[in-house]
Image (tube, coloured by chain):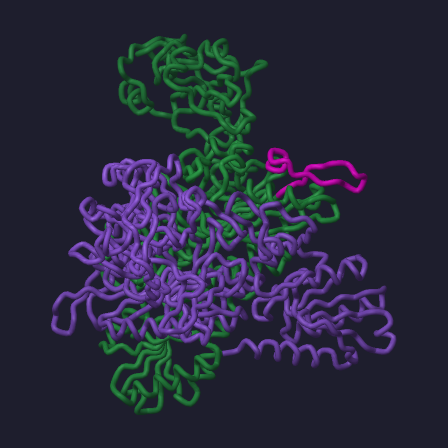
Chain colours: A purple, B green
């Protein structure tokens, strides 16, 4: 490609909403442009990168026997009602009535439709296992789209679905995809960790997340120092913490007037205490309509996934203010554990609360708190409806299996799930086993965010001058920059033609521009190898070669530049081979 | 690919709504499955065919310098309001409110969004011309989706957009795409004709349609016997027809009572006459709110595009019954030309009406008609607001430039348009010309229906046994069918491995099934070349080779089969090379 013909407009200014490196650099390097909140047009260079990523994904899927299909993106609402996910997805899933009055959804994913498809084709265990996938347009109406394509509304996802007759077969199919995912991310040149994950609204029994560690990531990863264990924050367990040393016996409960002081911070301020001395009481309503009180230390965060596991359903919500008043007798902010066990169906006490010597809590009375509330004395730790367990997020200082837990942020680029029989049961997908008996298949599903691979490659590969692409997904492998006049242009043209013929993906910067402008754009675009054809070197029959990721250039004889470049690119590629 | 592993379920029964060959055979051969009215899932073999077609399109677009991008499919309604096409598309375009209350559309095409994109990047004439395209998901909520993927709601379209600074440059860019389209359809192996077309709701000044002639097509093509001229029915002009021989002078107008008899057929029946003896009067309301009477011979059909040209706007509608009553004084069915010139703003008389000796018409009085109405005597043929011209569809017997017009049906697979400045004007897209003066670019747009290429290849390539694919887009180039036991299987396996290594796209039918079943599926799938490895031939060290499109097989030495097959496939490919 000749730069003068390329629709690749680099710009200096970035929009004010661009907070992270990938967002800024994708705009600056002319890879994409914003259309509306969370939707972007991919310009030729950006789209070419996505195509390279899709090809790697496609090759690795095909290599392990998965077969590519294309499912409709506009799907009948009925299927989503059958699985119940029309409710789970809420406003994130866009819906519209078609001209004949039927409700459709704009697919955020495709478990329902693929299960419906397989239900029509599957008869016998002999057809199992198989794995089908698509790489297609998806839409999720995020409440707050941000960070460019890291959290956009429209995106491209690879979603694969496997079907199995036994748990062993599901394990095997899951492991095959797990290994394929590793190859995908190695080949794409993005650093990644694999962490235990929750399956969330997908349902199912097991899940791993493939995460690119980087500061701008929205996911929090928890891992032991030795790396033996890693999970995302939703899934990370913690060891029980030790009981506070019991000093003198705690005085009796004391009621204090705390008018209009409902938040942890306000109470701390008002009573001159600190959050770890407080117990907060959260009231939940479960999917079945039961009420639950969840007790946490004031400085700890509720872990919704752990709470969900305890409550055994997928739709638990913090109770509405009226419900809280009905249960506790007080406004929001004044719930407390003393006496609450008689008012709720379930009481979950975080282990860290159970070992507190005493705490400050709400009084179940508007504008009042209690001091000196002692777990086990002022509210029970045992009982039919009571559980003491781990329902909080891990924090600095926590351990797991005796090992210190460390934290880092990351971008989720892929996730694999063992779904089990959920969707097949709900959508009537069955097969006859070897005995002619009807069985429900077990299912796995496997997603990769194509656009996020692109963005995370930038997040983990950039410097002050621009992007530093892994060679496998770079918009071009080599850029040739003539700086001079006719002679330099002619030599560059010759190198361009020969490298292109040798199968190297080249950009020739044939623009009528100063060397400085060309070098800046080459760095901004992040092309792995630059060949500079300048007057001084060329007079010595040499050109300069510089890798984007290195600071020094080397001089190479013009007669050797083709061979040298082919070898250099091969060497970069071999770093990413599997 | 091994057949035993392929998710390629062939079936015997077809759904009752499958009327045309492509729909039936795509279901039977396991290429696709229906999800809902007008939406289909592409199974692996069907999707592979689409990918082959997309690759051909991509290669030909890139070859002529067009650059691939990806535009969002969910687009802000505002842009469509700016162009006015939110109204033009009506219910065909799906709309939905997102969670923040903003209206979005599901893109049926992308002129607005691409113009908006270019408006942000275009500054100088030096950047022009360029051509950008995408191959992407589109949705049109057809009132009556039918014929499988020939008229589906969700489909894949290649849409290209070119931008120019002069009409000459637009002509050149248009011609480049015109030639590229020819190459695409030749390479895809579908027969096609190129016809003059109307640009319809796209706006613009010129258009050609690429149409695959076949009986199941929804488009009507009109062409001269020698092929020098071809157009679709909307665009096809006709020579004026000769005046009826004037015999005796026609008697005076006579009013007849025709109670409740409003349609042409009813009147003919009631008055014992025939449609060509009648004059029908259609009342239109133009976009500017004017009224127009259009006169046509009773047996002729109005050509909306020709009428639109006459009325000079894009939104003309047949007037509502109340409006007709207001203008003519009569209910629908009783409008007539006598006296109408004083009641409407515009009067358009089809040339065929002007040469009638006399006609039967409505009386502008409910339940009455007039006999012996003579053009020029009982209503004027000249005047300020009167035009005598061609506003009807061509019919059998018509000529153009003296040559007889013939008719055939076809499937539109591509269309190219000179859009001119319409979208750039409406969406504020400008550039500075060589004198630093602001100018509006001229635009061309160019569409290809990817799915329709697939379907029209089937419509024009099938027999009683199934599909007959052009080699370039066949799901596999070669199928190897072992019929026998271990020895035949081993020989087949060997041929499969060697052909695959030689770069041939092979399917090995390794299923444990009878020869008849395998042959039937091979024919149904339409794979261009079949190699049968049977016991009898193999005993002589031979295998049978049969082209799908031919009825006879030839025997080839096993030692020569690889070379033979590679040559045969090359030969098939060379038929489709450009």
Q: Is residue A211 above or below residue A576?
A: above
Q: Is residue B101 visible?
A: yes
- Residue in front for this viewpoint, A230 or B568: A230
Residue at the image point whose x is 60% and y is 45% from the top: B117
Q: Is residue B314 above or below residue B249?
A: below
Locate residue A195, reporting x and y percent. Answer: 41, 68
Q: Is residue A515 magenta?
A: no
Locate residue A2, reporting x and y percent. Answer: 70, 61
* B501 relative to B121 in the view: left or right: left
Residue at the image point whose x is 43% and y is 39% from the top: B98
Q: Which residues are magenta?
A: B423-443
How many tags in the picture?
A: 0
- Residue in front for this viewpoint, B57 or A23: A23
Residue at the image point whose x is 25% and y is 57% from the top: A310
Residue at the image point whose x is 87% and y is 75% from the top: A539
Q: Is residue A79 visible?
A: no
- Residue in front for this viewpoint, A423 or B414: A423
Looking at this view, name the residue that lies furthest to the front: A248
Locate residue A141, reporting x and y percent. Answer: 43, 46
Q: Is residue B424 magenta?
A: yes
- Residue in front for this viewpoint, A576 or B164: A576
Locate residue A147, reporting x and y percent. Answer: 53, 52
* A429 relative to A257 in the view: left or right: left
Q: Is residue B343 above or below residue B508?
A: above
Identify the image quadrant of the N terminus of chain A: bottom right
* B259 relative to B316 in the view: left or right: left
């Amino acid at each position: 490609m000749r730069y003068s013909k390329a629709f690749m407009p680099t710009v200096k200014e970035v929009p004010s909403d661009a907070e992270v490196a990938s967002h800024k650099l994708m705009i600056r390097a002319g890879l994409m442009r914003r259309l509306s909140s969370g939707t972007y047009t991919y310009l030729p260079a950006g789209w070419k990168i996505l195509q390279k990523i899709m090809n790697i994904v496609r090759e690795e899927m095909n290599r392990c026997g998965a077969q590519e299909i294309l499912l409709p993106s506009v799907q009948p609402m009925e299927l989503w009602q059958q699985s119940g996910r029309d409710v789970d997805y809420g406003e994130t899933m866009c819906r519209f009535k078609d001209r004949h009055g039927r409700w459709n959804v704009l697919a955020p994913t495709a478990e329902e439709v693929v299960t419906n498809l397989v239900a029509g084709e599957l008869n016998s265990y002999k057809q199992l296992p198989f794995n089908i996938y698509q790489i297609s347009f998806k839409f999720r109406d995020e409440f707050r789209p941000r960070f460019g394509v890291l959290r956009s509304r429209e995106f491209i996802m690879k979603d694969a679905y496997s079907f199995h007759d036994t748990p062993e077969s599901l394990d095997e199919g899951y492991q095959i995809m797990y290994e394929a995912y590793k190859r995908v991310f190695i080949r794409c040149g993005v650093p990644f960790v694999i962490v235990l994950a929750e399956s969330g609204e997908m349902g199912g029994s097991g899940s791993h997340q493939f995460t690119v560690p980087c500061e701008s990531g929205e996911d929090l990863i928890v891992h032991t120092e030795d790396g033996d264990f890693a999970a995302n924050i939703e899934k990370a367990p913690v060891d029980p913490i030790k009981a506070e040393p019991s000093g003198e016996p705690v005085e009796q409960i004391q009621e204090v007037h705390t008018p209009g002081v409902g938040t942890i911070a306000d109470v701390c301020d008002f009573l001159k205490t600190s959050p770890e001395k407080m117990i907060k009481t959260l009231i939940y309503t479960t999917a079945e309509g039961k009420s639950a009180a969840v007790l946490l230390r004031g400085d700890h965060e509720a872990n919704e996934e752990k709470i969900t596991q305890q409550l055994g359903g997928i739709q638990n919500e913090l109770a509405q203010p009226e419900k809280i008043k009905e249960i506790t007798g007080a406004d929001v902010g004044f719930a407390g554990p003393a006496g609450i066990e008689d008012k709720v169906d379930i009481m979950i006490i975080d282990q860290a609360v159970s070992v507190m010597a005493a705490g400050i809590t709400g009084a179940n009375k508007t504008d009042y708190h209690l001091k000196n509330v002692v777990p086990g004395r002022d509210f029970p730790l045992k009982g039919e409806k009571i559980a003491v367990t781990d329902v909080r997020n891990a924090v600095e200082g926590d351990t797991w299996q005796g090992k210190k837990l460390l934290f880092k942020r990351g971008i989720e680029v892929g996730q694999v799930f063992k779904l089990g029989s959920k969707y097949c049961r709900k959508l009537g997908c069955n097969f006859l086993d070897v005995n002619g008996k009807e069985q429900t298949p077990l299912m796995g599903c496997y997603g990769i965010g194509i656009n996020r691979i692109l963005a995370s490659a930038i997040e983990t590969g950039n410097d002050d001058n621009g992007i530093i692409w892994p060679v496998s997904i770079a918009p071009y492998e080599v850029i040739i920059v003539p700086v001079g006049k006719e002679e330099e242009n002619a030599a560059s043209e010759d190198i361009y033609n020969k490298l292109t013929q040798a199968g190297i993906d080249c950009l020739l910067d044939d623009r009528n521009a100063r060397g400085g402008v060309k070098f800046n754009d080459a760095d901004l675009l992040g092309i792995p190898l630059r060949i500079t054809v300048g007057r001084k070197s060329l007079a010595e029959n040499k050109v300069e070669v510089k890798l984007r990721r290195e600071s020094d250039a080397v001089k190479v004889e013009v007669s050797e530049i083709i061979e040298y470049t082919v070898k250099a690119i091969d060497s970069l590629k071999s770093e990413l081979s599997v």
